């Protein structure tokens, strides 16, 4: 014969969640004692209690809130490189480019600069013909090699100057926000 205050299995299973959380003992200690007594004598309800008390089972029962509509856009914005700072960094190279053009013009004069451009264009056409098998390998004048080396040196100096400027200017190159 059952006790007069005994709970049915269906009622225990309804109360099991709040019993495991401790809410039932806080809110209704007598009901918590009834659930504890029932679990002592019912193997099926004890199995359900064990599942309800296990962390993996409880984690599976949790639901997460739906992501916000702008989640993907917010993440992509946070990890995207800053184009404004890239443009600003390249504009620092503009004075060196102007300086290189001025040096070439000063060394060769305005007519000489046009002849250098014509020579480069002719060399490129010759290379295109040589690559297709239609022409001989173009010869490179020693002056062009010297100018190329000077231009490479100027580019290296400009890159070095740029690295110094970036290190000296705090906040010139913004860091990415962490999500």
Image (cartoon, helix red, strand yellow):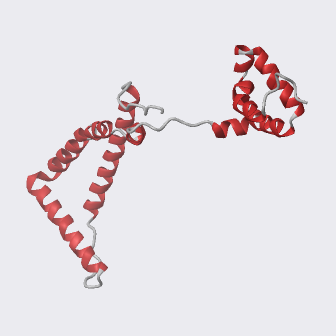
Frontmost residue, 174 versus 101: 174
Most distant residue in the bottom direction: 134
Image point (36%, 45%), residue name = 156
* Residue 5 versus residue 98 in the image, above or below: above
In the shown orientation, is residue 63 left or right of residue 46? left
Q: Splitting the image into 4 quarters, where does residue 159 fall? A: top left
Image point (84%, 30%), residue name = 39
Can you give x and y, in whole percent of width and height, for residue 166 in the image? 37, 32
- In which quadrant of the rendered image does the N terminus lie? top right
* Residue 165 versus residue 139 in the image, above or below: above
Image point (76%, 19%), residue name = 31
Image point (23%, 69%), residue name = 124
* Number of marks in the rendered image: 0
Can you give x and y, in whole percent of width and height, for residue 171 in the image? 37, 26
Frontmost residue, 105 versus 58: 58
Q: Splitting the image into 4 quarters, where does residue 34 fall? A: top right
Frontmost residue, 102 versus 179: 179
Can you give x and y, in whole percent of width and height, for residue 139 in the image? 27, 72
In the shown orientation, is residue 7 left or right of residue 136? right
Can you give x and y, in whole percent of width and height, for residue 64 in the image? 55, 36
* Residue 36 versus residue 79 in the image, above or below: above
């Amino acid at each position: 014969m059952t006790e007069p205050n005994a709970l049915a299995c269906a009622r225990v299973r309804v109360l099991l969640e709040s019993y495991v959380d401790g809410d039932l003992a806080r809110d209704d200690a007598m009901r918590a004692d009834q659930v504890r007594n029932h679990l002592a004598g019912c193997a099926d309800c004890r199995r359900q209690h064990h599942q309800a008390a296990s962390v993996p089972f409880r984690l599976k029962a949790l639901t997460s809130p739906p992501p916000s509509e702008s989640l993907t856009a917010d993440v992509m914005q946070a990890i995207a490189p800053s184009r404004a700072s890239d443009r600003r960094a390249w504009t620092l190279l503009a004075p060196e480019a102007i300086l290189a053009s001025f040096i070439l013009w000063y060394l060769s004069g305005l007519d000489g600069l046009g002849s250098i451009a014509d020579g480069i264009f002719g060399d490129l056409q010759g290379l295109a013909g040589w690559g297709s098998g239609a022409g001989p390998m173009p010869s490179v004048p020693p002056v062009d090699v010297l100018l190329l080396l000077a231009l490479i040196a100027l580019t290296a100096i400009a890159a070095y100057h740029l690295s110094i400027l970036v290190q000296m200017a705090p906040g010139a190159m913004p860091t990415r926000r962490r999500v």
